[in-house]
Image: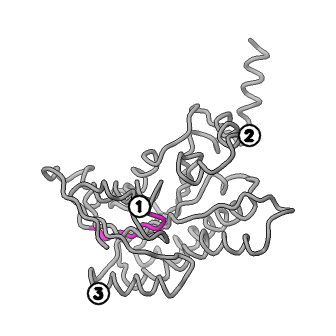
Amino acid sequence: MAVTRSGGLLRKRGHDMAVAGKIVIVTGAARGQGAEESLALARAGATVIAADVLPEPTALAAAAGPGTVHYRQLDVSRQEEWAALGQWIGERFGRVDGLVNNAGIAVRDRLPEVTLADWERVLSVNLSGALLGMQAVLPLMGRGGSIVNVGSVAALSAHYPVAYTVSKWGLRGLSRVASMELGPRGIRVNSIHPGFIDTPMTAAAPPAFRESNLLQIPLGRTGTPADVAPLVVFLISDESSFISGAEIPVDGGQAAHVGALPISEALRTFVA
């Protein structure tokens, strides 16, 4: 199913058209962060293959801009589905210029309680899904290609949901290996690490999760998908042509203080 919108006059080339003509896959694209990334890429001129396990791209109905969004149903943990998507893209477009491994799920059980089934399910989507995606697109991706793996601030700390945290730490390692292995082929690989972003996934968390995160964010607010999408566009674009192997937090400064913010605030109060 294709979702296509054309909006207004084409803007002049430059930052607004940073990915014009590129063919880009975004996983986990039916809603939240993935939907925003898909729309941002399309508005910047890309042809986007928005993929998700959900059957309907409800959040993509507002797609607008000079680019195009095509929706394909995909379970990222299934190799045969990646193979089918790769074949469809190869026959229709002949190449892939960018891949955004955004799909992810969360199980919030702590280490003593997490089941093996949940552990394996989270890793199959969050970590193996990214590996399968890269393997599927490599035959279609040439020099100048760019891969963005969407991690989490959980990959920069000892976060409590053990399966989710380990999957995102693994994604950091996978991204670093891939940047080294694929660099000689002219393909860049970077990872980004959002903090608390207002999405359906975080909305399902207990209110205390949001409140405790807010206390740790120096900028004093949670993020939105619109805070993440421009970075994805930049990393897919040729404007970031010498950036590879980077790990970029998008977290309002949360990871930077390594837990020192409460100490800093306590001392500020004490001194005052």
Mark 3 or mark 1, which has the lower sequence index?
3
How far is disc 3 from disc 1 in space, using C-alphas?
30 Å
Quadrant of the drawing holding the N terminus: bottom left
Where does residue 74 sit, x and y in percent of width and height? 47, 76
**How many labels, in total?**
3
How far is disc 1 from disc 2 in space, using C-alphas?
32 Å
Residue beneath disc 1: 242
- The overriding secondary structure of the stretch rendered in magenta is strand
Find residue 91 and name its label. 3
Q: Amino acid at mark 3?
A: Glu
Q: Is residue 124 magenta?
A: no
In the image, the segment drawn in magenta is: 22-29
Q: Residues within 10 Å of mark 1 (few under 14, many from 20)?
A: few
Above or below, comparing residue 25 to residue 227 in the picture: below
Where does residue 206 sit, x and y in percent of width and height? 69, 45
> In the orientation shown, which residue stands out farthest toward the top?
272
Above or below, comparing residue 163 to residue 62 in the picture: below
Task: Compare residues 11 and 240 and report the one nearer the observer.
Answer: 11
Q: Amino acid at mark 2?
A: Gly
Residue drawn where x is 39% and y is 74% of the image: 72
